[in-house]
Image (spheres, rainbow, N blue to C red):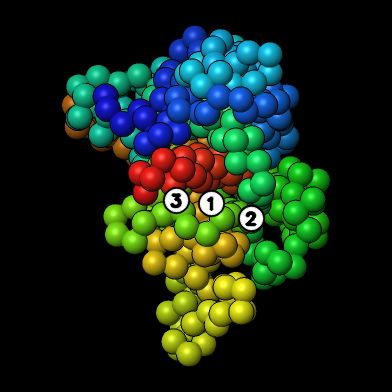
Amino acid sequence: MAGNTFGQLFRLVSFGESHGKAIGGVVDGCPAGIELDVEKIQLDLERRKPGQSKIVTQRKEPDTVEIYSGLFEGKTTGTPIGFLIHNTNQKSKDYSHIKDSYRPSHADYVYDKKYGFRDYRGGGRSSARETASRVVAGAIAKQFLKEVKINAYVSQVGELKLDEHYQELDFSLIESNPVRCPHPEMAQHMEEYIKTIKKEGDTIGGVITCVVQNVPVGLGEPVFDKLHAKLGQAMLSINAVKGFEYGSGFNGVTMKGSQHNDTYNPDGSTQTNHSGGVQGGITNGMDIYFNVAFKPVATVLQAYDTINKAGEKVTAQGKGRHDPCVVPRAVPIVEAMAALVLADYSLLVRTNRL
């Protein structure tokens, strides 16, 4: 199975399955001499881990990261940073009922057809459990970037949507509620709605907005290596993501060019930022902001029709511990993937590779 590496110079190789002994990764290309605060890495893992509130999966995993290489006396050595996160709360029996059948909208069917074999326990390699490795790597990338600020938050759950622009919000409130929405009143509505969906044995989707500030001018190239194109790839590689838009996004089609154009100030900044911090594929120093759409979690705790390996129609029902809405736990994942892209492009610029 290919496709387990992300990045060109600042690279992550992740490994492991949902119900294996552990998951982990290797970060290669991180420069030497970066002071690395392991507690900050652990904090991002705490934000992603299961069992943190009543509106997420109740799988209890400590998600404690263990770093085995690439770090000495609190600083990176420039060698590969190897890390491990043990799986301690697997309940593989919860998946025995799907051993010979395929869950709708999961990777079960395509895995069987492509590889001729699949790990049905929690989805194996296709499980969102793999994203814990991305969070570790992204937390390392954040500390390499230093001055760059990355803040993601939940801006929509189902039809409950924030109308406020990100500049009107207080990012310090993101972690003040389990939904990770920086608007207390809307966060309460979202939380109650997710609880209702959970009681119904169903799931709901949502949107995460990410804002990246203090980005230097000049990251990215104008053709195939556009900065926003790599961000799109990064976000669309996250489990359950169905859409990506940056800047004015799809709303931009309703505007005239005279309205949409970002007029320059004498210092090169722009009076508006419909471009989302990227022009011609290259960062212009303005805030990068984008939205990531997540579908409803495919596993519903209701009876459903499907087929088995023999192609016969069967009825099954979801079991086990699953998120009724994935977006609260996906916030640090979105931040991590943004950090990995920016760290990689920063090194590419330094080495004149882009």
Sequence-first tag of 3 and 2: 2
Q: Which label number is shown at residue 214?
A: 2
Q: Which label number is shown at residue 205?
A: 1
In the image, residue 62 sits, relative to residue 35, either above or below, namely above
Type of the residue with mark 3 = Leu
State if disc 1 and disc 2 touch (CB < 8 Å): no
Assess disc 2: are there few (<14), some (14-19) or many (≥20) residues with their C-alpha within 10 Å of its C-alpha: some
Assess disc 1: are there few (<14), some (14-19) or many (≥20) residues with their C-alpha within 10 Å of its C-alpha: many
- Residue at (75% x, 54% y) in the render: 171
**Disc 3 to disc 2, C-alpha distance:** 17 Å
Q: Toward the viewer: 217 or 8?
A: 217
- Residue at (59% x, 30% y) in the render: 140
- Residue at (52% x, 59% y) in the render: 217
In the image, residue 137 sits, relative to residue 75, either above or below, namely below
Circle 1 SS class: loop
Q: Which label number is shown at residue 231?
A: 3
Q: Toward the viewer: 285 or 201?
A: 285
Q: Mark 3 or mark 1, which is nearer to you?
A: 3
- Residue 160 horizontal side relative to residue 118, left or right: right
**Disc 3 to disc 1, C-alpha distance:** 21 Å
Is any part of residue 30 visible from this angle?
A: yes
